[in-house]
Amino acid sequence: MSRFLTLALLAVPVAAIAAPATTLDQVSAHLKAVDTMTARFVQTASNGKSIGGTLTLKRPGRVRFQYDKGVPLLIVGDGKSLVMIDYQVKQVSRWPVGKSPLGVLLNPNQDLAKFAKVIADPTDGPMLVQARDAKHPEFGVITIAFRRAPAAPAGLRLEGWTVVDAQNNRSTVRLSDQRFNVAVSNDAFNWTDPRPRKPAGKL
């Protein structure tokens, strides 16, 4: 797996662009109606290689991407920061939730019209919501897919998202087996720090 593409998944900020409020209102209603969600995910890089895992989400701000056995990465959001832990190299990286594209999904109280627009809304296909920072095109673009589902909260189901960076590298996350508003403990967002601890008394 490309660690760069995993970083791209987290590091794309969003900023203000105009959007049709009526359709975005439906997306906002869905986000506000979902307190928790679990799902399987498959992440595919530009080279076609895919890895899978389990997504656990609890609003506001908490998320966990638990990759399948054999992938030494973990991504966790604790409500304030998104943390990527690479257990292979014992490295921990952090980003403010608000500077991540996942901030769109983790904070249901945002005004989507300030940073997103609908680019597709077919009756028989996925609704696509795109966000980008117009002042910083080098950060790339995130496109989030929803599908109309009458039994899902507010009639929409989150299907996944795609991030394309300034070098045209693409990382896509697709979801399946979505379950909404199930019991999720805050303990689900704990993680073990792989960095060696310094001996007591030493700087």
Image: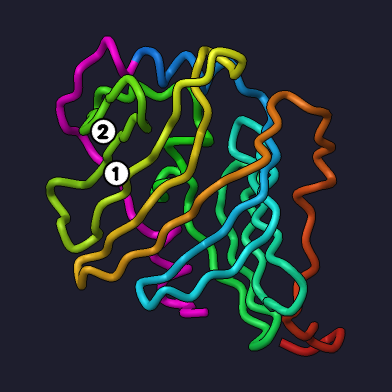
Relative to 41, 182 lies left or right: right
Relative to 38, 130 lies left or right: left
Q: Quadrant of the C terminus?
A: bottom right
Badge 1 element: loop
Q: Residue at x 28, y 24 (%)?
A: 122
Q: Is residue 135 above or below residue 17?
A: below
Label 2 to label 1, Cα distance in Å? Answer: 6 Å
| Residue 21 lies within the magenta run | yes
Residue wearing tag 1: 14
Q: Is residue 162 above or below residue 59?
A: below
Task: Name which residue type carries label 2.
Answer: Phe
Q: Residue at x 36, y 30 (%)?
A: 125
Q: Which residues are magenta?
A: 1-24
Q: Residue at x 39, y 59 (%)?
A: 11
Badge 2 element: loop
Task: Name which residue type carries label 1.
Answer: Val
**Foreground: 173 or 83?**
173
The quadrant in which residue 111 appears is: top left
Relative to 64, 8 lies left or right: left
Circles 2 and 1, Cβ within 8 Å, touching? The answer is: yes
Graded by Cα atoms within 10 Å as few (under 14), some (14 to 19) or many (20 or more), the crowding at tag 1 reads many
Q: How many marks?
A: 2
Graded by Cα atoms within 10 Å as few (under 14), some (14 to 19) or many (20 or more), the crowding at tag 2 reads many
Where residue 184 appears, as percent x and y from the top left, is 81, 35
Residue wearing tag 2: 115
**Foreground: 131 or 92?**
131
Q: Is residue 179 above or below residue 90?
A: above
